[in-house]
Image (cartoon, grey):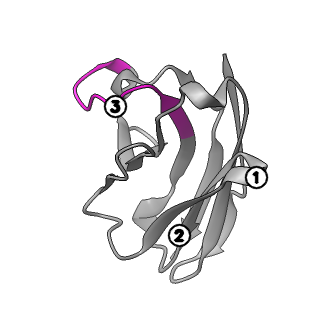
Amino acid sequence: QVQLVESGGGLVQAGGSLRLSCAASGRTFSSNVMGWFRQAPGKDHEVVVAISWSGGSTLYADSVKGRFTISRDNAKNTVYLQMNSLKPEDTAVYYCASGARYASSSPRYGLDYWGKGTLVTVSS
């Protein structure tokens, strides 16, 4: 089992920045893939960014390219999402997720472990 706990959400004005954190514990070595996802009010989950640690490949949603950056601190078992130039349409609950493989067309993107989410609200 892997436990994921997100933090860092809050209220920010458009154009501002936030950094989300995802602290992982448990069998973290089984999590080859980690990612950030979000769900805006009345909308489906969407991928924000997914990264494969073994292959080094990273997938960013077109809507966040150039504005959001994923990174990690191995010593702290923590993954970060730096969000810059935030827009009102970035308002959503942001979730951290991990698993062995990423499958865009599978339920929950094929990822086994999900945090409870952190709310990001961007005001105009």
Q: Residue at x 68, y 51 (%)?
A: 74
Distance from Cα at disc 2 to Cα at disc 1: 22 Å
- Label 2 or label 3, whichever lies nearer to me, is 3
Would you name the residue on which mark 1 appears? 75
Which of the marked residues, 2 or 3, is nearer the chain's N terminus?
Answer: 2
> Label 3 is placed on what type of residue?
Tyr
Query: Which residue is depicted at the point 52% across and 79% down?
Result: 14
- Highlighted range, magenta: 96-107
Is there any visible trace of residue 40 in the rendered image?
A: no
- Mark 1 vs 3, N-terminal side: 1
Circles 2 and 1, Cβ within 8 Å, touching? The answer is: no
Amino acid carrying label 2: it is: Met
Residue behind mark 3: 102
**Image check: 88 left or right of 43?**
right
- Of badges 1 and 3, nearer the viewer stands 1
Which residue occupies 55% across, 25% down?
30
Q: Are marks 1 and 3 in contact (CB under 8 Å)?
A: no
Query: Residue 44's image quarter?
Result: top left
**Mark 2–mark 3 distance (CA, rounded to whole Å):** 22 Å
Q: Is residue 33 left or right of residue 65?
A: right
Question: Mark 2 falls on what kind of element?
Answer: strand
Q: Which sits earlier in the primary sequence, circle 2 or circle 1?
A: 1
Q: How dense is the environment of label 2, judged by Cα within 10 Å: few (below 14), some, or many (20 and up)?
A: many
Residue nearest the viewer, comparing 29 with 24: 29
Residue at the disc numbered 2: 83
- Residue 67 placement (x, y as % from top left): 41, 75
